[in-house]
Amino acid sequence: MPRLTTLDIRQMKEKGEPIAMVTAYDATFARLIDQAGADMLLVGDSLGMVVQGHESTLPVTMEHMIYHCQAVVRGSQRAMVVGDLPFMSYQVSVERALENAGRLLAEGGCHAVKLEGGERSAAAARAMVQAGIPVVGHLGLTPQSVYALGGFKVQGKTEEAARRLIDDAKRLEDAGVFAIVLETIPVPVAEAITRSLAVPTIGIGAGVHCDGQVLVSYDMLGLFEELTPKFVKRYDDLGARTRVAVRAYVDEVKARTFPSDEFSFR
């Protein structure tokens, strides 16, 4: 089964077909999410919080991202795999950004990279695109700037802030990105951005008018309970179900009822 490409993703917007993106961090989850029909797998630096246990995404390194991208690519077949460029891997200089984006493709094996920011990241995005590296932009609540933003708050609530987001989206489109993630933005603002662009928008807390949606897999499955944003719909509660299953195992071990003859060799 051929991988989806940037052309496929852009054509989905043209056809009015919503794009389904989900985060993945290892081969097992990548395989399950890919088989469930997701169009794009995002190896997000959110792994810093949901996998590594940090309070933010900032401690994630290029080496971490390369390792997890490799696993997700191995575990998937159809979905396009996008790798996050971690904090300070692209902000220092265009040259550094280009080098690290190239590493995510060459070493990590992913098919595109994602970077946060509008005007400040446009030059780096343009250089990557010119070098043949597909790029996804990210506007609104940009988690790598969480301290500068004063926390995980809705962005673009004033007319000036909304206009700035629209301008940033156009700058990223002009730089050559093939899609833009819009995070925690008022619905009318996200709709205006989506209508103004030829490239797809992928929302997370940005309403139904975006061309696609993305959720963190650990959030939508109830595996990460430390932070529950308003925009997260839990499609299952695997956290609670895991505790029940492991508790049953522990009880059987303590009672010496596991392993029974069924699970033993004679």
Image (cartoon, rainbow, N blue to C red):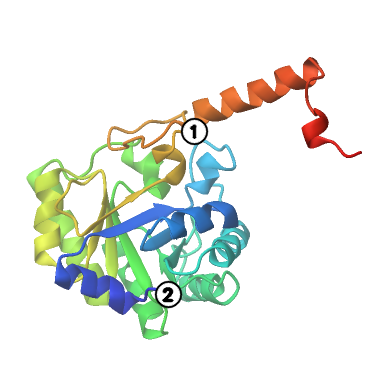
Residue type pointed to by label 2: Arg
Q: Badge 2 is on which residue?
A: 3
> In this view of the protein, which residue sits in the foreground, 195 or 140?
195
Quarter of the image with the N terminus in it: bottom left
Could you say where residue 214 lies in the image, as x and y percent from the top left? 33, 51
Residue 26 visible here: no
Could you say where residue 63 lies in the image, as x and y percent from the top left? 63, 61
Q: Is residue 260 above or below residue 54?
A: above
Quarter of the image with the C terminus in it: top right
Element marked by disc 1: helix
The quarter holding residue 252 reads top right
Element marked by disc 2: loop
Which label was assigned to residue 238?
1
Q: Badge 2: few (under 14), some or many (20 or more) residues near its Cα, within 10 Å?
A: some
Which label was assigned to residue 217?
none
> In this view of the protein, which residue sits in the foreground, 124 or 19?
19
Task: State which tag comes first along the sequence, 2 or 1.
Answer: 2
Q: Residue at x 78, y 25 (%)?
A: 258
